[in-house]
Image (cartoon, rainbow, N blue to C red):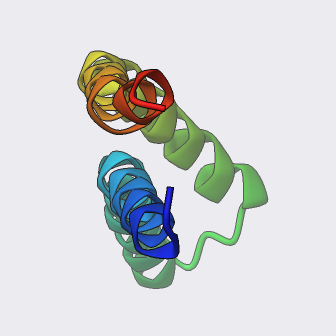
Amino acid sequence: MTEGDLLDVLREALWMALVMATPVLGIALVVGLAIGLFQALTSIQEMTLTFVPKLGAIVAVFWLSMSYSGGLLVTFFNDQIITRIAGQ
């Protein structure tokens, strides 16, 4: 395996990590903004109001996207890692 091959695998791995993290981080951003806006409009400064709904939304999106993320990981390992191990 050359340095170029290693860099290609690392680039693909970083891209895969970004693709898998995007739904969870996106929903955390949206829910955080919505709760922050709600707190600013109502002047409620309760700490659990920010934590619990955001955690619930993150867990729900993570659960919904697990099969997609798992499929991406399996495809990545079959196409990139296993073929390079078997080829050498």
Instruction: Please state the horizontal and vertical placement of residue 21, each as a whole percent of the image.
Output: 42, 52
Would residue 64 be found to the left or right of residue 48 on screen? left
Instruction: Please state the horizontal and vertical placement of residue 72, each as a whole percent of the image.
Output: 27, 31
The outermost residue toward the bottom is 40
Instruction: Please state the horizontal and vertical placement of residue 8, each as a whole percent of the image.
Output: 36, 66
The outermost residue toward the right is 47
Instruction: Please state the horizontal and vertical placement of residue 52, each as a whole percent of the image.
Output: 63, 40
The quarter of the displayed image where residue 71 is located: top left
Q: Residue at x 36, y 46 (%)?
A: 20
Nearest to the observer: residue 41 or residue 8: 8
Nearest to the observer: residue 28 or residue 15: 15
Would residue 31 be found to the left or right of residue 45 on screen? left
In the rendered image of this protein, does residue 34 appear above or below residue 28? below
Q: Residue at x 48, y 84 (%)?
A: 40
Q: Residue at x 51, y 42 (%)?
A: 53
The quarter of the displayed image where residue 69 is located: top left
Q: Residue at x 42, y 24 (%)?
A: 82
In the rendered image of this protein, does residue 45 appear above or below residue 24? below
Nearest to the observer: residue 81 or residue 16: 81
The quarter of the displayed image where residue 66 is located: top left
Q: How many marks?
A: 0
